[in-house]
Image: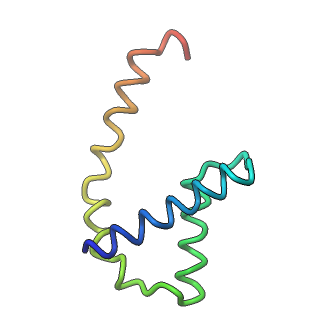
């Protein structure tokens, strides 16, 4: 599982690097996901390598929306 988490983080960091170095208007996370999709499609990364880590993250996905929801409620007047 640790290998899968590291692999996911590496793709995120590479995406962030592309976004900042090339000054792209696309968020680095989106670029990282596209690169991961490309790597999975071509076969550079096996699905089994990230399955356990991605299932763990997906099981807690609802918790990741709590800070965003609280921020929207706190700053609703500005939005």
Q: Quadrant of the N terminus?
A: bottom left
Residue appearing at x 54%, y 64% in the figure: 33
**Above or below for 5 versus 18:** below
Q: Residue furthest bottom?
A: 43
Of 44 and 72, the residue lying toward us: 44
Colour scheme of the rendered structure: rainbow
Q: Is residue 58 left or right of residue 43?
A: left
Q: Position of residue 3 (x, y in %)?
A: 31, 76
Q: Residue 47: give x, y in percent of width and height.
A: 41, 83
Number of numbered discs overlaid on the protein picture: 0
- Residue found 50% across the figure and 9% down from its top: 77
In the displayed structure, 25 sits above or below 4; it is: above
Q: Is residue 14 left or right of residue 52?
A: right
Image coordinates for residue 32, horizontal then vertical, percent:
56, 62
Instruction: Choose between 65 and 8: the one closer to the eye.
Output: 8
The residue at 35%/85% (across/down) is 48
From what the image shows, is residue 50 above or below residue 43? above
Question: What is the quadrant of residue 15 in the picture?
Answer: bottom right
Question: What's the residue at 73%, 49% (across, down)?
Answer: 24
Is residue 42 positioned above or below 7 on the image? below
Residue 63 quadrant: top left
Q: Indicate the quadrant where residue 75 lies.
A: top left
> Furthest-top residue in view?
77
Quadrant of the drawing holding the C terminus? top right
């Amino acid at each position: 599982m640790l290998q899968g988490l590291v692999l996911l983080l590496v793709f995120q960091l590479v995406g962030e690097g592309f976004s900042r170095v090339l000054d792209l208007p696309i968020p680095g996370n989106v670029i990282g996901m596209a690169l991961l999709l490309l790597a999975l499609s071509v076969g550079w990364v096996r699905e089994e390598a990230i399955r356990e880590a991605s299932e763990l993250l997906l099981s807690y996905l609802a918790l990741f929306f709590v800070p965003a929801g609280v921020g929207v409620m706190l700053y609703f007047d500005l939005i």
